[in-house]
Structures are given as structure tokens and as C-alpha cells.
């Protein structure tokens, strides 16, 4: 990765283009991260429930360790936990934790 790429990743600035998807209504600020089609093809049945919610720029996985959580099933469990416990309060907490993670670079590779 280039030094500029590392800097953009550390501050999560590489996520900014997805903000246009939020403005267009295709994504939410908070919600399960958008999957790539190849990933969806490999989903088990219980993973598919995460597709029931609009994808988001940030999620419980990102504020729970992001790159430290490498087990796919653990990531999916966090997404389902978010779906099962969704509330405006939870979204606000995730947004505050996201801002903190961005400012400190915690969890960024």
C-alpha cells in the first residue's frame, strides 16, 4: 500500500465515496457493511438475514475492533446483533464510537 493509501485508510477517508450512496438513499449511515456479490454467494442461510437491512457506512463490527475481528462468523454475529437490537440510541452510540475510531485511527490497517 502506498503512503497516501495508508493515510487514507488510517483515517477511513477511503470510505468517503460511499457517503454519496447515503445521500442517494442507497445506504444508511449505520448498518451492516455492504457485501460484495462473491461474498453473498458463500453465505450460509443464517448469514442472509443481514441483507434484510439497508447497508451502512459504519457498523457494530467497525467499532468493535474492525480489522482485529477476522472471523467471518463473528462479524456476521455482530451484524445480526445490530439488526436484533436496532434503535436510534444504538445508531447514535455507534456513530460516536466511529468518530472516536476515525480520530484515533483505532482498528485501521
Image (cartoon, grey):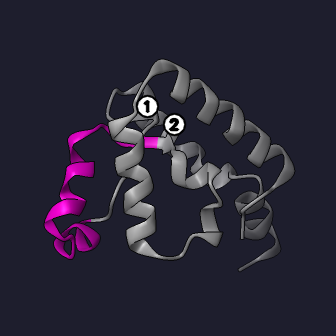
Residue shown at 19% from the left, 61% from the top: 46
Marks 1,2: beta carbons within 8 A: yes
* Residue 53 percent across, percent down from the top left: 27, 38
* Residue 11 percent across, percent down from the top left: 76, 52
Compared across the picture, whether 97 is left or right of 61 comes to right
- What secondary structure characterizes most of the magenta part? helix
Can the viewer see residue 55? yes
Q: Label 2's element?
A: helix
Q: Can you identify the residue that label 2 sits on?
A: 19
Pick the residue in front: 35 or 67.
Answer: 67
Compared across the picture, whether 65 is left or right of 46 comes to right
Q: Which residues fall within the magenta stretch?
A: 37-56
**CA neighbours of label 1 inside 10 A, class few (<14), some (14 to 19), many (20+):** some
Which label was assigned to residue 51? Answer: none
Residue shown at 37% from the left, 61% from the top: 76
Residue 7 position (above or below residue 22)? below
* Residue 75 percent across, percent down from the top left: 45, 63
Residue 60 part of the magenta-drawn span: no
In the displayed image of the protein, which residue is found farthest to the left?
45
Residue shown at 72% from the left, 71% from the top: 109
Amino acid at each position: 500500500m502506498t503512503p497516501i493509501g495508508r493515510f487514507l485508510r488510517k483515517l477511513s477517508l477511503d470510505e468517503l465515496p460511499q457517503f454519496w450512496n447515503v445521500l442517494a438513499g442507497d445506504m444508511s449511515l449505520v448498518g451492516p457493511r455492504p457485501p460484495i456479490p462473491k461474498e453473498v454467494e458463500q453465505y450460509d442461510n443464517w448469514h442472509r438475514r443481514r441483507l434484510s437491512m439497508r447497508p451502512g457506512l459504519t457498523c457494530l463490527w467497525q467499532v468493535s475492533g474492525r480489522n482485529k475481528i477476522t472471523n467471518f462468523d463473528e462479524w456476521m454475529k455482530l451484524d445480526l446483533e445490530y439488526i436484533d437490537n436496532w434503535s436510534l440510541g444504538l445508531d447514535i452510540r455507534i456513530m460516536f464510537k466511529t468518530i472516536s475510531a476515525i480520530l484515533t485511527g483505532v482498528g485501521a490497517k
